[in-house]
């Protein structure tokens, strides 16, 4: 069957590219099942909606399937309508975190015959087979659709894939892979890079987080991970990699095994991962460093114990500080991410976050808390009537640098001012500690990433920190 997979655009003016692993895994499973698969990658090829629609049409598909996280809803909406008008008989579906959390909104607003809930590889293959053979696709597990009355219907839930090593490697070559490999990486560095997925799931329970793979963690074998990385080196000459799992460091033994094998088989390769402050220790970090790890991003989120408790983080600000210092002390760069505007946020808690960053000597963008569908705070926001119209909310989503839903007692203006002040103060303190190296390096990074707009953003944040009050 001819199937076209569509990766909707990221929707920002950034210059780095993130490879869509989910869609690439679905693509390789469909290929393995014998289908003819085309990818229309709006992100990797920088396509406009019209260009993407032309390419979809030119691929003469019998089925079109859309990926993209919840922030790309508006593209799925627009594209599915265009596809339906140009290719009326084609079967349309979509997968990923958006459709898995708010399937009804997607099905009502977009031209989709059904959506794939959760892990997509096996469901997509069974769905394609049913559509191709003309059998009743509603019998396939892991799907949702609207019945003739417009009511949401779901088939049986799909069982998680027990053995991740059984999956074929992502179908990198169906995508404009060279654009990804040579793009600026997430550290804003220019180095040939491509990441790999080591595990699915996270055992923790933070209230702002949605885990498509749930709380029980499935891991690939270290051998399979390293063999895949060796292939990436051979095929694409990568020098840098990473593990964009929910949480790479959730199991110490696993991390140690992966590191031992990477050290042995991939000596020159450097890498990064997402970490959690209560899952690392000195020996583990030293082993990671020894195996090439040079960057860990910790979700710190707040410097206030009260806010961390509100977020069900299960860690204290002191633990966060210790982990950042420990990581830096073994020679790995520690990056922190921060959010502002959680239920219960006050001027005092924001000041604690600013103080935290001063002590930790780190800077990071401070993003507005957004109650993404599927999270505990989304349900609370709905209950409190803070989201009137879910579709409108999805249409506005982007990268959380805009305030979409205010969960605090501040007015929108107060919260935005507070964010600008905190962001600016954190950045200014960080830069002025080593002005001759840090200022030029930050400006250069932002210029590379966002052009002149990025620089202007920096200058504004700096001025805000000087002139606004905390
Ligand atoms: C890497 C990553 C990113 C990368 C980009 C990834 C990309 N290429 O799109 C970066 C760092 C840029 C990023 C940014 C953001 N991210 Co992000 N990100 C992730 C992360 C950690 C891994 C994604 C991944 O590759 N997973 C592995 C693959 C294999 O899984 P998958 O993508 O879910 O795909 C499977 C299924 O979804 C399904 N599927 C997927 N696509 C398709 C398509 C079809 C046709 C079918 C049938 C099935 C299907 O099958 C796949 C295989 O099983 C996830 C967490 C996670 N573990 O998923 C968060 C996550 C997706 N991100 C999230 C968020 C909130 C964001 C941001 C909004 C954060 C922010 N505040 O700015 C931004 C959005 C920016 C934007 N403009 O859109 C949330 C989404 C929440 C939600 N309810 O939807 C997640 C779930 C994190 C979380 N735990 O809350 N992110
Ligand atoms: S934020 Fe990180 S640690 Fe918390 S539940 Fe999500 S993936 Fe796990």
Image: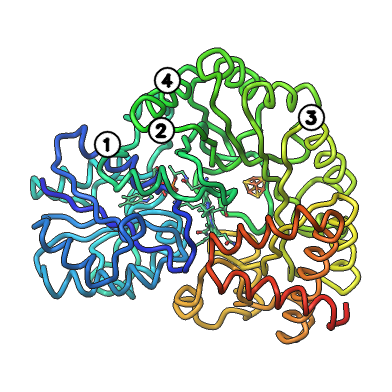
Q: Quadrant of the C terminus?
A: bottom right
Residue mark closest to the camera, 1 vs 2: 1
Across and down, in percent, residue 79 comes to 26, 70
Q: Is residue 385 left or right of residue 355?
A: left
Q: Is residue 344 visible?
A: no
User: What residue is shown at x 81% (from left), y 42% (from top)?
Assistant: 324
- Would residue 395 be found to the left or right of residue 281 on screen? left
Q: Which mark is residue 29?
A: 1
Q: CA distance from mark 2 to mark 4?
A: 20 Å
Q: Position of residue 116 (x, y in %)?
A: 33, 53
Q: Is mark 3 within 8 Å of ligand 2?
A: no
First of labels 1, 2 by sequence position? 1
Q: Position of residue 420 (x, y in %)?
A: 75, 75
- Dot 1 falls on a residue whose secondary structure is helix
Which numbered tag is attached to residue 161? 2
* Quarter of the image where the N terminus is located: top left
Task: Tell which residue pokes out farthest to the top in this image.
Answer: 264
Mark 2 CB within 8 Å of ligand 1: yes
The earlier-in-sequence mark between 4 and 1 is 1
Looking at the image, tell me whether mark 1 or mark 3 is earlier in sequence order.
Answer: 1
Residue 330 image label: 3
| Numbered badge on residue 136 | none
Please give the label number shown on residue 227.
4
Above or below — where is 332 with respect to 444? above
Local crowd size for mark 1, using a 10 Å CA cut-off: few (<14), some (14–19), many (≥20): many
């Amino acid at each position: 069957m001819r199937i076209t997979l569509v990766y909707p655009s990221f929707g920002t003016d950034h210059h780095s590219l993130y490879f869509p692993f989910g869609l690439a895994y679905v693509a390789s499973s469909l290929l393995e099942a014998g289908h003819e698969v085309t990818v229309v990658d709006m992100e990797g090829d920088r396509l406009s909606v019209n260009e993407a629609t032309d390419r979809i049409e030119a691929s003469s598909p019998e089925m079109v399937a859309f990926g993209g996280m919840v922030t790309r809803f508006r593209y799925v909406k627009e594209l599915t309508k265009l596809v339906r008008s140009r290719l009326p008989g084609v079967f349309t579906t979509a997968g990923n975190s958006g459709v898995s959390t708010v399937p009804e909104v997607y099905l009502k607003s977009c031209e989709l015959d059904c959506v794939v809930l959760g892990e997509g590889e096996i469901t997509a293959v069974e769905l394609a087979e049913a559509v191709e053979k003309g059998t009743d696709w509603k019998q396939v597990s892991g799907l949702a659709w609207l019945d003739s009355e417009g009511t949401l219907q779901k088939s049986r839930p799909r069982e998680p894939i027990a053995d991740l090593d059984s999956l074929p490697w992502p179908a990198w070559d169906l995508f404009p892979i060279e654009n990804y490999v040579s793009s600026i990486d997430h550290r804003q560095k220019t180095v040939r890079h491509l990441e790999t997925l080591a595990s699915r799931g996270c055992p923790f329970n933070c209230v702002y987080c949605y885990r498509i793979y749930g709380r029980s963690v499935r891991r690939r074998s270290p051998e399979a991970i390293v063999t895949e990385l060796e292939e990436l080196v051979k095929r694409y000459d990568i020098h840098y990699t990473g593990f964009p799992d929910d949480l790479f460091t959730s199991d110490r033994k696993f991390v140690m095994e992966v590191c031992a094998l990477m050290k042995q088989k991939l000596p020159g390769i450097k890498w990064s991962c997402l970490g959690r402050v209560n899952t690392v220790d000195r020996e583990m970090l030293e082993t990671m460093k020894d195996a090439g790890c040079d960057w860990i991003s910790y979700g710190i989120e707040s410097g206030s114990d009260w806010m961390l408790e509100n977020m069900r983080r299960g860690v204290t600000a002191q633990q966060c500080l210790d982990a950042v210092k420990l990581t830096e002390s073994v020679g790995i760069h520690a990056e922190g991410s921060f959010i502002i505007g959680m239920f219960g946020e006050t001027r005092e808690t924001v000041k604690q976050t600013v103080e935290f960053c001063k002590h930790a000597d780190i800077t990071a963008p401070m993003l507005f808390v957004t109650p993404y569908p599927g999270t505990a705070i989304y349900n609370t926001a709905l209950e409190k009537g803070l989201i009137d119209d879910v579709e409108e909310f999805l249409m506005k989503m982007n990268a959380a640098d805009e305030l979409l839903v205010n969960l605090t007692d501040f007015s929108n203006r107060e919260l935005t001012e507070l964010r600008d002040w905190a962001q600016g103060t954190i950045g200014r303190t960080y830069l002025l500690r080593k002005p001759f190296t840090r200022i030029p390096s930050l400006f250069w990074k932002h210029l590379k990433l966002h052009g002149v707009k990025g620089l202007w953003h920096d200058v504004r944040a700096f001025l805000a920190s000087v002139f606004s009050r905390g």
